[in-house]
């Protein structure tokens, strides 16, 4: 188990869709340990495997004193009529927060380390986390979801940080 460094915007691993986990071996168990250790720091809500340089479909979360993980997550349900428009940030885009529209409710299905089905769902912050982390695993950053005028300001701020 180890606290891992976070990859930041500009690193190509963040833009590469992650591969399905087909075998749950020691490498995957170690990855989950690292995801849990790395997300377990104040101010961290979620962490996708590619944010620590591993291009596999797995993420961890730390929401409301609950820490967990899911392998091969897929969003299977989003609220269609209820949305949230709060500011969103990302460990891979440090120090920047921008208003990002997300579904109010999200439901993700995946598996655990025993290969058994897992359902993770929630509203508000948990829903935002589930959507945000699944985006990471698909090679997207929250910046990609910003409205055009906000995205322009966000990309300028990102360039200024580089």
Image (cartoon, rainbow, N blue to C red):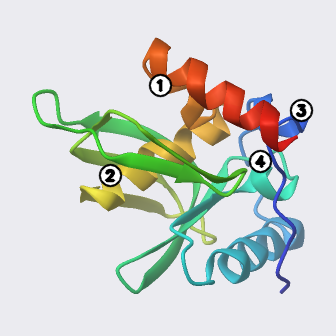
Residue 56 is marked as 4
Q: Are marks 4 and 2 in contact (CB under 8 Å)?
A: no
Q: Quadrant of residue 101?
A: top left
Residue positioned 54% across, 75% down in the render: 43
Give the structural element (helix, strand or loop) at label 2: helix
The residue labelled by disc 1 is 146
Residue positioned 42% across, 18% down in the render: 147
Q: Residues within 10 Å of mark 3 (few under 14, many from 20)?
A: few
Does 31 sit above or below residue 72?
below
Give the structural element (helix, strand or loop) at label 3: helix
Q: Residues within 10 Å of mark 4 (few under 14, many from 20)?
A: many
Left or right relative to 154: residue 83 = left
Whole-angstrom CA distance, mark 2 to mark 1, is 17 Å
Dot 3 or dot 1, earlier in sequence: 3
Q: Are marks 3 and 2 in contact (CB under 8 Å)?
A: no
Whole-angstrom CA distance, mark 4 to mark 1, is 25 Å
The residue labelled by disc 2 is 127
Whole-angstrom CA distance, mark 4 to mark 3, is 14 Å
Whole-angstrom CA distance, mark 3 to mark 2, is 26 Å
Dot 2 or dot 1, earlier in sequence: 2
Residue 92 is marked as none
Is residue 109 shown to the viewer in this render?
no
Residue positioned 60% across, 71% down in the render: 114
Task: Nearest to the eye among marks 4 and 3: give it.
Answer: 3
Dot 4 or dot 3, earlier in sequence: 3
Left or right relative to 109: residue 158 = right
The residue labelled by disc 3 is 12
Q: Are marks 4 and 1 in contact (CB under 8 Å)?
A: no
Whole-angstrom CA distance, mark 3 to mark 1, is 20 Å
Is residue 120 or residue 130 the one in the foreground?
A: 130
Does 9 sit above or below residue 122?
above
């Amino acid at each position: 188990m180890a606290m891992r460094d976070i990859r930041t915007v500009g690193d190509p691993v963040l833009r590469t869709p992650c591969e399905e986990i087909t075998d749950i071996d020691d490498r995957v168990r170690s990855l989950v340990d690292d995801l849990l250790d790395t997300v377990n720091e104040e101010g961290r809500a979620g962490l996708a495997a590619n944010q620590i340089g591993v291009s596999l479909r797995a993420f961890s979360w730390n929401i409301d004193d609950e820490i967990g993980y899911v392998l091969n997550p897929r969003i299977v349900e989003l609220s269609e009529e209820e949305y949230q428009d709060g500011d969103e940030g990302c460990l891979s885009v440090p120090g920047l927060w921008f208003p990002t529209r997300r579904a109010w409710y999200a439901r993700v299905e995946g598996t655990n380390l025993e290969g058994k089905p897992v359902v993770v769902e929630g509203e508000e912050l948990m829903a935002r986390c589930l959507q945000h982390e699944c985006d990471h695993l698909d090679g997207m950053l929250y910046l990609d979801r910003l409205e055009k005028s906000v995205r322009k300001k966000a990309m300028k701020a990102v360039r200024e940080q580089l």
